[in-house]
Every structure is written in structure tokens, then in C-alpha cells.
Image: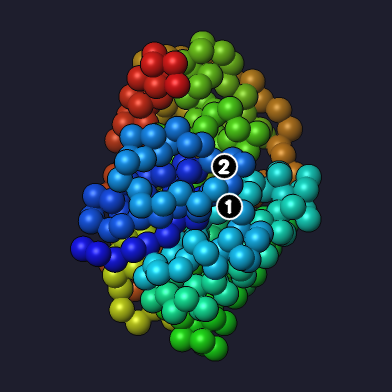
Amino acid sequence: MNDRVLVTGGGGFIGSHLVRGLLSEGYRVSVLDNFMTGHRKNLQEVAGDIEAVWESDVRDLQSCLKAVKGVTAVFHLAALASVSGSIEEPILSHEINLTGTLNMLQAARKNSVQGFIFSSSAAVYGDGPAMPKKENMKPDPMSPYALHKLAGEYYCRQYSALFGLKTASLRYFNVFGARQDPESQYAAAVPIFMSAILKDEPVHIYGDGEQTRDFVYVGDVVRANLQALRSEGLNGQVMNIAGGEKVTINGLLKALEAVSGVSAEKVYSDPRPGDIRHSRADISAASAHIGYKPAVGLEDGLRRTFQWFRKARWAGQ
């Protein structure tokens, strides 16, 4: 296969997995990343197989145009992926998450790219009581991050309608897996909990732990991106990418304790502003449009992830 593709945010957690997935399928892969939140070490094992690494910023249109030249598809993952971070720095979030997305869409259009897969977020739904979350529900973004992701979806839809660019927006729920950074100021629950367990430190939980999330293993997210690229007739569709089951944070920790064989000390504190209470996805649209079906369950995914974290800690990574 000679198709050249670009992954923005390829040095990040999900992006580095997608780079590997694309390489294993025979794609010629380039990466655009400013490494503000991503890491070069995430690509170290496959650095020799990557065609080009553009250490550039999606906020700069000229850099986007250069990186997109000659590619057939763009996977746009570059983002400041944090609810709390967007509340602290809404202008920075807007510039990266929205202006950056518009720059990439414009670069894709100018270079006659055949497919544009946008990484969106379940945060666009807000905290409404209706479950499961379906794509035709009225969005209710509760943070600048959620608002910027929603606007990015609308831009993707418009670029399909106005310019014929094949686009799809994938609303990720709670993604977890290897190479998720527990030290990041925007770190998610799974790597934070795993890191605390491995260090024999207390696990800190915001709220009472009875809030629910829909967890999805990163390998399933990679498969969803590949399936979206290969699917015909996409013109701005929005799809939930999730496991399709709700799990409490307390339940997540219990599953982690079972996987690790460690009983963790728990410390509860006030909920964070912007955090939603409950979340669960309806994944039927992704199933219908791109044939998506999660292949890795929560327990299996946590086991794989814990094994990686334990090995990485021993290796001093």
C-alpha cells in the first residue's frame, strides 16, 4: 500500500497507537506534533518507519499546508485534551482545539485530501440525565474544551457539504491504554490510579466515586479510525466510540485492584468544575456507518494496560 497519511498529535497517547496501527496496515505515515503534551519517546520504537515528523503547531496554517502536501488522508488528533485545562486557559484551548482544526481542514481541502477523520469527545453531550448518549441528542457543552470539539464537528460537516471533503467525527468516551501519561497535568483516571497503585500511594477520587464513565480500550479507538477511513459515503457523520457500558469510578478502581492484586487506600475530595456526573454511549451509529464493535472488554484492557505500566516502571520509563 502506498497511501500516505498524516496523524496530527501523533506523539500523544492515542496518536502514537494510531501511528502504529497505520504502519502495521502498510500505510506511509507522517506525524505533525509540537510535543507540547505528546512525547517523542512514544514514537521511539517506530521512528525508523515514520516517513516524516513535522515538529510544528496546528495553530500555524502554513505548517499545516506543508505537512498535508501529498497525503491522501488526515487523522486530526492534535488537541489540548482537557476540560479543566480549557477552563483555566480558554483562549489557548480555542486556538489549539478550534483554530487548529479549521487550519487542518483548510489544509486538507487545499491539498485535495480524500479523507479527514476528526477526534472529538463525549464532553459535547454535557451532563443531561438521558442515557445512553446518542448522536442526535441536543449537545450541551459545559466547558470551553467541549464547545471547541463541538464546533470542530460542525466545521467538518460544513467542509463535507461545501467542498466535498470526506469527513467523520469520532466522539471518544473514556479512552485508556498503554502510554497514557499519569504525570500530565491533564491525566485521566486510569493512568493516575495505576501509577498510585504501583507506587503504593493513596488513590485520589474527585466526588463520591459513584459517577459513571464509559471506558474504551485504545486499540478499539485505533480500529474505529481505520474503519472510518475505509468506509464509503462519509460526509460529516458524528459517531460515538466507546465500550457501550457504564462503570462507576469506584467500580473502575475495584477492577484495577483485582487486576493488580493490590487493595488501594482511597481519598475522596470535591468534584472538579466542568466534570460530568454520568456517561454511557449508544454505539449503534458507529456500528451502522463503519462497522465498529469494541473487541477488548474493560477487564482485559485494564490487564493489558497494567502489565505495560508495570513493565514501563521497571524500565524507568
Upstream in sequence: badge 2 or badge 1:
2
Kindly identify the residue that appears in the image at 54 percent across and 71 percent down. Answer: 107
Q: Residues within 10 Å of mark 1 (few under 14, many from 20)?
A: some
The numbered disc on residue 56 is 1
Kindly identify the residue that appears in the image at 42 percent across and 75 percent down. Answer: 113
Residue 114 lies, with reference to residue 99, above or below; the image says below
Residue 281 percent location from the top left of the image:
46, 58
Residue 208 percent location from the top left of the image:
64, 33
Name the side, left or right, on which 226 lies relative to 167. left
Quadrant where the C terminus is found in the figure: top left
The numbered disc on residue 133 is none
Residue 115 lies, with reference to residue 121, above or below; the image says below
Name the side, left or right, on which 217 lies relative to 250. left
Mark 1 is on which residue type?
Ser
Kindly identify the residue that appears in the image at 63 percent across and 66 percent down. Answer: 61
Whether residue 302 is visible to the viewer of this picture, yes or no, is no
* Residue position for label 2: 35
Residue 37 percent location from the top left of the image:
59, 40
As rendered, which of 157 and 110 lies closer to the eye? 110
SS of the residue at dot 2? loop
Whether residue 267 is visible to the viewer of this picture, yes or no, is yes
